[in-house]
Amino acid sequence: MRLRLRAALAAAVSAFALVAAAAPVSAQQRGPIITSTSGAFLAAQAAATRADIESAALYYSYVLQRDPGNTQLANLVFSMWLDVGNLAAAAPLAAGLVSIDPGFERGRLVLATQSLRTGQFTAALGHLNAISGDAVSILTVGVLKAWVEQAMGRTDDALATIEAIE
């Protein structure tokens, strides 16, 4: 009897060890367990403090759903999604922020990139043309515009765009 109990206990411990040793899942795959807006905000703060930007963005996104008019929070979540390279999550926020501030250049770049990915070249050019920016933006936008023009079959325009970069 005692031997069976030990064998059962050993099997249970082994099974638990296998489950515990399984590959960790990212925060986005498992999704946050959220019970309140204030709890989500505190969890986001804690995640940001640990430099877990993806988890912080997920928790802040939950808070933003409950306070959609909070442009400061929307900008923060947008920046966090950019930090972790999640353009798909950043794009809807970019659209909202650009509708509030048409001069929001980072948002325009994200929207231009998404438009390029989906073959909406005219929309991409529209976003790129709306960016005035600094020297880095001018170079980035100029090169992106040339690529869009080339994709549209307008090679002469693309070359002229590259030549015009100062």
Image (cartoon, helix red, strand yellow):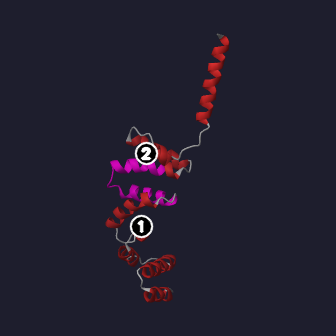
- The location of residue 143, given as percent across then percent down, is 49, 79
Circle count: 2
- The location of residue 91, given as percent across then percent down, is 40, 62
Residue in the image at 50% along x and 46% along y: 27
Quadrant showing the N terminus: top right
- The location of residue 8, given as percent across then percent down, is 62, 19
Q: The disc labelled 1 sits on which kind of residue?
A: Gln
**Is 23 rendered above or below residue 150?**
above
**Is 160 rendered above or below residue 128?**
below
Q: Which residues are magenta?
A: 56-83
Q: Considering depth in this image, is 140 or 18 the residue closer to the camera?
A: 18
Q: CA distance from mark 2 to mark 1?
A: 29 Å
Residue in the image at 46% along x and 89% along y: 160
Question: Is 9 on the left or on the right of 135, as rendered?
Answer: right
Q: Considering depth in this image, is 110 or 19 the residue closer to the camera?
A: 19
> Badge 1, how many Cα within 10 Å: few under 14, some, many 20+?
some
**Is 1 rendered above or below residue 84?**
above
Per the image, label 1 sits on a secondary structure element best described as helix
Q: Is residue 71 magenta?
A: yes
- The location of residue 70, given as percent across then percent down, is 35, 55
Residue where numbered disc 2 is placed: 41
Residue where numbered disc 1 is placed: 114
